[in-house]
Amino acid sequence: MIPNFPFSKDLNVYLLRLPVLRREDRITLIGNIDPVTVFLQGSEEDMRHSVQEAYQEAYDAPAGFILRSGCQVPYQTFALPYEQELIRHINHYTSDVSLHICGHITKVLPLIGQTGASALSVDQNVDLEIAKQELGDQMVIMGNVDPVAVLCQGSPDLVAEKVKACYAKGKDSPKGFILRSGCGVPYNTPIENIKTYLQVAREEGEK
Ligand SMILES: [Zn+2]
């Protein structure tokens, strides 16, 4: 048994935070599986349960659903084997697995190619240019507008500038590029910043 299953709580955050955007059916929901509670402390059965429960809850989301994990422990020993195992399980449901890892992961980018994920989401601590060079020919690169300093605390002009900068680096990535916030978007992010982010993203994506 996994007490206080973390996925449901996180999913509700996304559902509650983006009601306006969700009505447009353009937002992909993201659910998290806690790498420590489930991977390191749980059994294989716990992990299977977590993945199945996540998909039962969100598989019919209008614009799609992504299940992800993250980990900030020594990567090769404590994260990579479990991420490989999780992705193997998720691949029973879909082959479109995206992996998000918070923080300074530049040094482990070469290892991430071994996870089996089809996309990697990086936060603002990783240079998209380097991520593209290391993994762009293996997986889709996603990122990485700073959710706090830019999306939450910045002006709409700063948001527009950073979105354009992300596209400038990522758009020619061989397997593709998806603009994304560097990590979870804070509750008190101004809606004007979100609208600017989406508007500029659409403009840049159509260029
Ligand atoms: Zn993150």
Image (cartoon, helix red, strand yellow):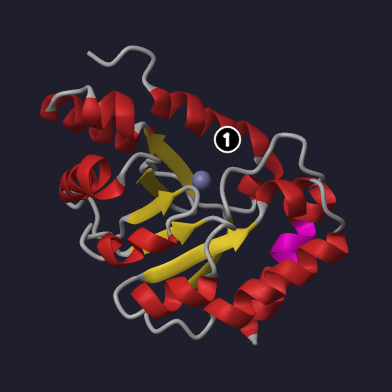
Quarter of the rendering occupied by the C terminus: bottom right
Residue 174 is drawn in which quadrant?
Answer: bottom left
Name the residue beneath numbered marker 1: 15
Q: Nearer the viewer, residue 55 or 120?
A: 120
Residue 163 visible in the picture: yes
- State left or right for residue 29 relative to residue 158: left
Amino acid identity at mark 1:
Leu
Work out whether 118 lies above or below 42: below
Residue sticking out furthest to the left: 44
Residue 3 is drawn in which quadrant?
Answer: top left
Quarter of the rendering occupied by the N terminus: top left
Badge 1 element: helix
For image coordinates 20% across by 23% down, the residue present is 42
Q: Residues within 10 Å of mark 1 (few under 14, many from 20)?
A: some
Work out whether 204 lies above or below 49: below
For image coordinates 71% across by 44% down, the residue present is 20
Q: Position of residue 88 (x, y in %)?
A: 15, 50
Report how many numbered discs are placed on residues in the image: 1
- State left or right for residue 90 relative to residue 132: left
> Does 197 lie within the magenta span?
yes
Q: Position of residue 200 (x, y in %)?
A: 74, 71
Magenta residues (range): 195-199
> Does 34 lie within the magenta span?
no
Work out whether 36 lies above or below 90: above
Q: Position of residue 89 (x, y in %)?
A: 16, 44
Magenta stretch, overall SS: helix
Residue 202 visible in the picture: no
- State left or right for residue 65 relative to residue 196: left
Q: Position of residue 31 (x, y in %)?
A: 43, 39
- State left or right for residue 83 relative to residue 109: left
